[in-house]
Image (cartoon, helix red, strand yellow):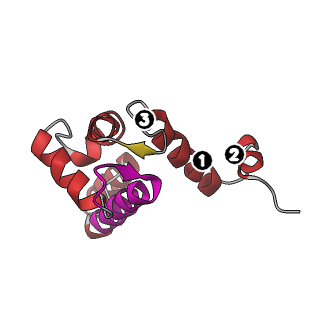
Amino acid sequence: MPRSKCDVMSKEPSSNLESAMQMLIKTFHKYSGKEGDKFTLSRGELRELLTEELGNYLGNAQDKDAVERVMNDLDANNDGEVDFTEFIILIGALTVACNDFFLDSPPPKSKADSNSDGAAEEKKE
């Protein structure tokens, strides 16, 4: 017999990926339904979610024009609201962009690397 959706969400996640998936679902529903449909994000709910949850990645999420652009890009069915599938598209696109950014960036030097470089320089002299 297949498990119900509630059974899956009530169990403790057994992996980091399961935890991340549950967190995405919980975060979406933390903001959805404050205005109107409990299964979608209105513009105001989206603005609040972007500001509170993704401010470091999106910059000025309080900028009305920026939120409007994000909303228009996400709202694939043009109903003026963002459903969970449309929300996941945003999260996926941001995750890809972050991955690309970090792949292109050189890794930061750790203190251990800095100390070992200095020690190597001293030994050469």
Above or below, 75 against 27 in this view is below
Going by the numbered disc 2, the residue's amino acid type is Met
Above or below, 88 against 19 in this view is below
Going by the numbered disc 1, the residue's amino acid type is Gln
Label 2: which residue? 9
Query: Element type at marker 1?
Result: helix
The residue nearer to you, when weighing 107 against 41, is 41
Find residue 71 and name its label: none
Label 3: which residue? 31
Going by the numbered disc 3, the residue's amino acid type is Tyr
Q: Residue 115 location in percent, x, y?
A: 34, 49
Q: How many marks?
A: 3
Judged by depth in the image, the label closer to the viewer, 1 or 3, is 3
The residue nearer to you, when weighing 19 against 33, is 33
Q: Residue 105 location in percent, x, y?
A: 26, 64
| Quadrant housing residue 45 | top left
In-image side of 47 versus 95 (left or right)? left
Span highlighted in magenta in the image:
78-102
Taking the view exactly as shown, the residue that stands out farthest to the top is 34
Taking the view exactly as shown, the residue that stands out farthest to the right is 1
In-image side of 56 versus 18 (left or right)? left
Q: Quadrant of the C terminus?
A: bottom left
Q: Quadrant of the N terminus?
A: bottom right
In-image side of 60 versus 12 (left or right)? left
Point 48% across, 45% down: residue: 39
The residue nearer to you, when weighing 121 against 113, is 113
Cβ–Cβ under 8 Å for marks 1 and 3 = no
Label 1: which residue? 22
Label 2 environment density (alpha carbons within 10 Å; few <14, some 14–19, many ≥20): some
Point 33% across, 59% down: residue: 94
Cβ–Cβ under 8 Å for marks 2 and 1 = yes
| Quadrant housing residue 42 | top left
